[in-house]
Amino acid sequence: MSTSKKTSSLESLFLLDETMNNISIKCLKSEQILSGACHGQFVINSLKTGQGITIGNQLRRVLLGDLGGVAISAVRITGITHEFSTIPGVREDILEILLNLKGIVLKSKIKDIQFGRLQIQGPNVVTADLIQLPSDLEIVNPNHYIATISTSNILEIEFKFEYGTGYSLASQIFSEEEENYLQLDTIFMPVQKVDFKIENVYDTTNNISERLILDIWTNGSISPKNALESAAQIIIDLFLLLLNNKDTNEINQSYPKTQSISIKHYTTIAIEELQLSVRAYNCLKKAQINTVGDLLQYSPEKLQELKNFGRKSADEVFSTLKNKLGIILK
């Protein structure tokens, strides 16, 4: 992908495993297609058997689900209160206009909520390049069609731009504070499609390795190369978080040993020391349960089967063991 000496995010992903240092990554194709969309094809060589499907699936999931983008989330049209209205002098109804607005592709350097404005007098053909945007926003497909004004009427729209990931339904992002806004079903995903295939490669000694060929299509707000590197960085950050989380490992390793010692220490304690109610104490004594060790031989279900030992008595025993001795019956 990159010929520079600086290690890319994708190369770093494989360098996490010293056995994968021979892997090479190359961009086979990079092209701009219809309406500003982009396509890129990449090949990852020298993978071990089974690694192709693992890496391909992981990259595909992250590319489609975890990369974020900017989109129009809501609009306010002067004189319009609901999406089933029509605008005098405009060929399209509100639903058609909203559908056309969903096709506008944006890219931004920041993730804050931003606003834009469109005010134009007809007769005129309204396209995306007529929208007044903040300096940090850019329209990828400026010739995208919005509507046609056939009279001298004025079309005035205020836009709300938001950053997000995935897909948000209008019902999920509705806010009563913005009752004058019409909410849009918003597609934040910059990656439109990801395909991959795996090929077996045989060397001169008949050893088998795998080659992963990855095709990425984006909406043009991000290049396929940058999308691939961003996805790889997300995966790296996730695994580094697990790798560096030593506190969890230490707790998991020490917990069974500590619990075993504690329980063994408490097994000889007489149940009188638990200071249970008379009813619970008498039921345990009648069942020949004289120590905590005897009590630990019973599961919660088996304990409740004792004669006259109801749910209330069982809850009392459970809470006493937990609060006084730190023991939980399982």
Image (cartoon, grey):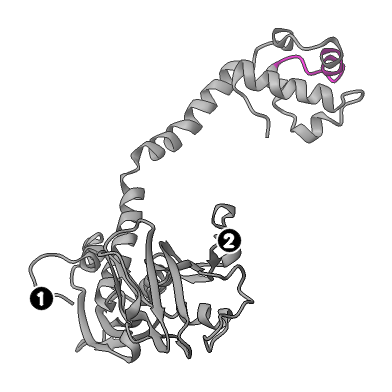
- Residue 309's place in the image compared with 26, above or below, is above
Where is residue 8? Give x, y as percent: 18, 66
Q: CA distance from mark 2 to mark 1?
A: 44 Å
Looking at the picture, tell me which residue is in the foreground, 259 or 97.
97
Where is residue 310? Give x, y as percent: 87, 26
Q: Which residue is mark 1?
A: 3
**Is residue 65 at least partly visible in the picture?**
no
Q: Which residue is mark 2?
A: 172
Count of labels shown? 2
Indicate the quadrant containing the C terminus: top left, top right, bottom left or bottom right.
Answer: top right
- Residue 124's place in the image compared with 51, above or below, is below
* Residue furthest to the right: 308
Question: On residue 24, which mark appears?
Answer: none
- Is tag 2's residue or tag 1's residue first in the polypeptide sequence? 1
Look at the image and give the residue range highlighted in magenta. Answer: 281-291
Residue 120 belongs to the span the image colors magenta: no
